[in-house]
Image (cartoon, grey):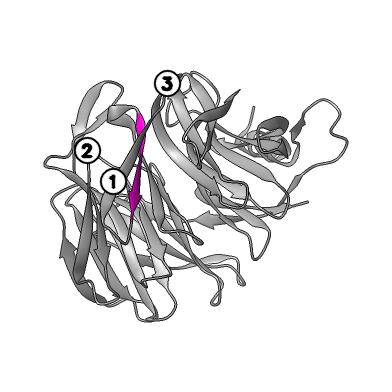
Amino acid sequence: MGNRTARLLILQMLLLPVLATGQSSPVLVLKTRIALANVKGRLDHLGVDVKGQRLFATAFDNHTLEVIDLQAGRQVHTIADLYEPQAAFYDVSSNRLFVACGGDGTVKIFDGSTFQLLQTVKLSSDADNVRYDARSKRVLVGYGGEKFLQGKVARGQGDGALAFLDSAGKQTAEIAIDAHPESFQLEKLGTRVFVNVPDHQEVEVADVVKGSVLAHWLVKTCADNFPMTLDETHHRLFVGCRTPASLLVFDTESGKTVASLEALNSDDIFYDASKGRVYVLGAAIGNGTAGSGFMDVFQQKDSDHYEKIASYPTGPGARTGFFVPEWGELFVSARRQGEQSAEILVYETK
């Protein structure tokens, strides 16, 4: 089979969703694919500039951050020499771009227009997920604590914590976490933050005003709880596990698990409030990081009941992405495979 034929077959797979029983039309449509030239290896989490219509892709193994102009549909800038970048956040109010780097535990702050480095914040180790607290106008970064992957220490040392940074990069507070914090989600109507702590097989619930942990919710039926998303309206927290691959649903008022669903070995999950759906990005059960990527779509029947309505093949190592509710679009990162460049897949919700 020639390279051209192979590429055509891959494209056909990406355009053809695997629909669940009873689902007559696609719930997601692949709008376009944006090539990322000279990007090798694993891609981590994405950030977005909604007003400026830009996407920021952290290329972990490539040690770069790729800036993508979504109107033009192309890669327009590369920030190089980042030590294992894992997440990015753009603060429109200050026009500053925050990039968390796991390799050296730093948060690099760049001018959002010129991409000039303005500040380097040094945390103890493994700067990871980044979120924004609109109430206090501070950026939160999870860092520190030993990180275990597949039962072995991957990296990290010291105590885990969430660091609070102002727009200039000054650390104003922190919340101590028992081990390395993975994905975390903040309430918009309340003051709590929910934190996945896979090394303790639990979700830690903290108060961002008090700066302390309020509760520990055990993840009883699975392990390696990395991704997370929040449905604040219905008081539901979604937690993705890798062992076994599953999706748990917690009641955020009681802390109890109300549903457990078979799902992908996931890195990112997103809740679509307008359609009552959960999008799970990851690999099929048994596949590793570089395995064939898929996206499962679950429909919320009510607060305690969910049904998988579709599954889409994405691409090699396509385990991370970003959902932009303002646009009804979901972006998925696919790593380079042979002659096929790394790329961003842009899906429109239906």
Q: Which mark is residue 183?
A: none
Q: Quadrant of residue 137?
A: bottom left
Q: Which mark is residue 178?
A: 2
Which segment is the magenta one? 202-207
Percent of width and height locating residue 217: 39, 32
Q: Describe residue 47's horizontal placement relative to residue 171 as left or right.
A: right
Residue at mark 1 = 213
Q: Which mark is residue 220?
A: 3
Q: Quadrant of residue 181?
A: top left
Percent of width and height locating residue 76: 47, 70
Q: Quadrant of residue 172?
A: bottom left
Contact, CB < 8 Å: mark 2 with mark 1? yes
The answer to whether 157 is drawn above or below residue 284 in the figure is below
Mark yes or no: residue 235 visible.
yes
Q: CA distance from mark 3 to mark 2?
A: 18 Å
Identify residue type, mark 1. Answer: Val
**Sequence-earlier tag: 2 or 1:** 2
Q: Residues within 10 Å of mark 2 (few under 14, many from 20)?
A: some
